[in-house]
Amino acid sequence: MTGDGGTPVLEVEDVGLAFAGVTAIDGVSFDVRPAELFAVIGPNGAGKTSVFNVLSGVYRPQRGRVRFLGEDILSRRPHEIAAMGLARTFQNVELFHNLTVLDNLMLGRHHHFRYGALAALAWLGRARRQELAARAAVEDIIDFLELAAWRRHPVRLLPYGVQKRVELGRALAMEPRLLLLDEPVAGMNLEETEDTARYVLDIRDELGIPIVLVDHDMGLVMDLADRVLVLDFGRRVALGTPAEVQRDPKVIEAYLGGSS
Amino acid sequence: MSTGAPPETARPEAAGRPAAARRRARRPGGRPLLYTSYAQDMALLDTRAKKIWFYGIVLAALLASQVLVDDMLSLLAMAYVVAIGAIGLNIVTGYAGQVSLGHAFFLAIGAYTGAAISGDPDGRVLGLGVTSILVWLPAAGLAAALAGVIVAPLATRLRGLYLAIVTLGLVFLGEHIFKEWDQLTGGPGVGRPAAVVELFGLRLDRPGPLGSKEQQLYLLMLVLLVVFAVAARNLARSRIGRGFAAIRDRDIAAEVIGVPLTRYKLLAFAISSFYAGCAGALLYTVTGFFDPGSFNLLMSVQFIAMVLIGGVATISGSIAGALFITLLPRLTRELPALVPVISADTTQTPNVFQVETVLYGLLIVLFLVFEPRGLFGVWIRVRNYWKSWPFSY
């Protein structure tokens, strides 16, 4: 999945989003390259999650363009964008609480199935074959994320850190072409944070999946990211490598407050 | 690390050659819970206990047709049909989370479609004279499913209580139409004959090779219930059932991971209504006659009670709930002999019918408070108790 010769996987051009006059995103542009770990940071309310919601089709911006794998996705429904290979996790865990870990991961593969209601009722032929193949694929993810101990547990009974991991697994089960991670280490202790960082790096390096990461953990972002986009009040403050961004006076002002 | 490998190449032997894999994957002797293939792990009857229970119950039900009196067989046959309807409601309400109070409406559509197709062409009410159950049963299901598809767009706009109220409106709408449409329904207080049950030229509603009318109908309903129940269980463990559950638990997330909301809500209503339509068409073949007033709010509430008492989002629970609610009146009829205060006479208070109605409400409340998983949950508790016996933890 790595080499399109550097053609961006995702291109965001001048996107503007407002809710009843309150501007959430104000003319933001960026692109994500193949196998890149791209981070979006900014103070609370800067519009980070809004950007994610635009990308996954939950919000529809008033202006701008978003191209994913070369196709305009702004007019598409969320499930269509998901089927194109855009997976995401949520800031507050959004799992299917009554279902087991296994079923949650299997749901990640929902759009990979090619059988209809009648085949499902009979559980014959295609339905059975595809379910078994999906199960094998999901077991690989269970291995990768070390979820085997919780396979049959309803996710609502699991500790928070594990739920976060199940959500990451559900996104991976989609076999995404681009992965959006919304605060993957929020509320985690140091050890869990380091585990997650390792998973994120593995996903990029071994699977070659480009990642857009939103987080408040500066240490994590600066360590992992190839490039960083800094937002404040819905506007782009800076874009560049972690080192460049850290030196940028506008970034320092946004985070530490102006000297006014 | 092999997470990204496509499944087709990752496990060819698990996916591609299930028959061979199954032969090789015989469980080592004495270890019934050791699974050596995903096919075993994903089987419906994945433990020996489940197999024994399932085949045992089916066998007992078959034997019952030879042992029980005809009166009891009719009651059980009706309970089996009702169970098909309850499974239908559980699909849309239990699995997909779309509360529907309009189940009686879909049963009515099935009942009248079946009766009209198989009815006497020269009779007092509408009839086409096609008596084969292979024709009218699917037709009744499809007619109801079509109605479900027409209603479903409401569910994409509304949720929770609002959807419940709108589907409630369906019941009143249907009740009115069916009461006024004399040519089809025979009108209130008069009614019309139910669908004629004929299979391969054999009339099952008359004494035949399989025994009396009651025995034959009982066996038919039993077979149909098993077929419908297994199909529903398959649906529940498929991508479709998982999609339903995803919509129930968190609809925005479901859409973002690729479950099309509108299409799945439509599908849930269509399949649920198909079950309801088939149940409706079969329901009155036992008694032979039905009145348009039957498809009222009470019927919808009874179905809700079956789902809640039996167990939300479980198929076996739906069946247990249906048996429970259908057999309950038979138990309450015995009350006057035991508790003289309760009268069998409807003109007196308190009478058995009032007790029955109160019991429905009381049972729903008690189950919701003490065992929200219903009879299914009670069964799980009993099972776990004996699994760990004599230790209580």
Image (cartoon, coloured by chain):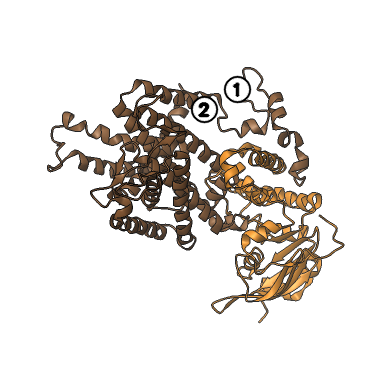
Locate the N terminus of chain B by quadrant. top right
Q: Position of residue B268 (x, y in %)?
A: 50, 51
- Precedes in sequence: disc 1 or disc 2: 1
Q: Position of residue B47 (x, y in %)?
A: 56, 27
Disc 2 target residue? B50
Residue at the location (45% across, 53% down)?
Answer: B98
Residue under the point 24% across and 40% down: B356
**Number of other residues with Cα within 10 Å of mark 2, as a class: few under 14, some 14 to 19, many 20 or more:** few
Rendered colour, chain B: brown
In the image: residue B80, left or right of residue A226: left
The residue furthest front is B122
Would you identify the image quadrant in which residue A180 lies?
Answer: bottom right
B291 sits left or right of A136 in the view = left
In the displayed structure, does residue B163 sit left or right of residue A86? left
**Residues tagged by mark 1 and mark 2 found on one chain of the structure:** yes
In x, y percent, where is residue B51?
A: 53, 25
Residue occupying the point 78% across, 41% down: B9
Which numbered disc, 1 or 2, marks the residue closer to the eye? Answer: 2
Q: Determine the CA span between mark 1 and mark 2.
A: 12 Å
- Residue bearing the label numbered 1: B32
Name which residue type carries label 2.
Answer: Lys
Question: Which chain identifier belongs to the orange chain?
Answer: A
Q: Nearer the viewer, residue B93 or B226?
A: B226
Asked if residue A80 is positioned above or below residue B294 in the image, the reply reads below
Q: Return the chain for callout 1.
A: B
Outermost residue toward the right?
Answer: A5
Q: Residues within 10 Å of mark 1 (few under 14, many from 20)?
A: few
Which residue extends farthest bottom? A260
Residue type, label 1: Pro
Q: Residue A36 is drawn in which quadrant?
A: bottom right
Q: Is residue B176 or residue B213 the one in the foreground?
A: B213
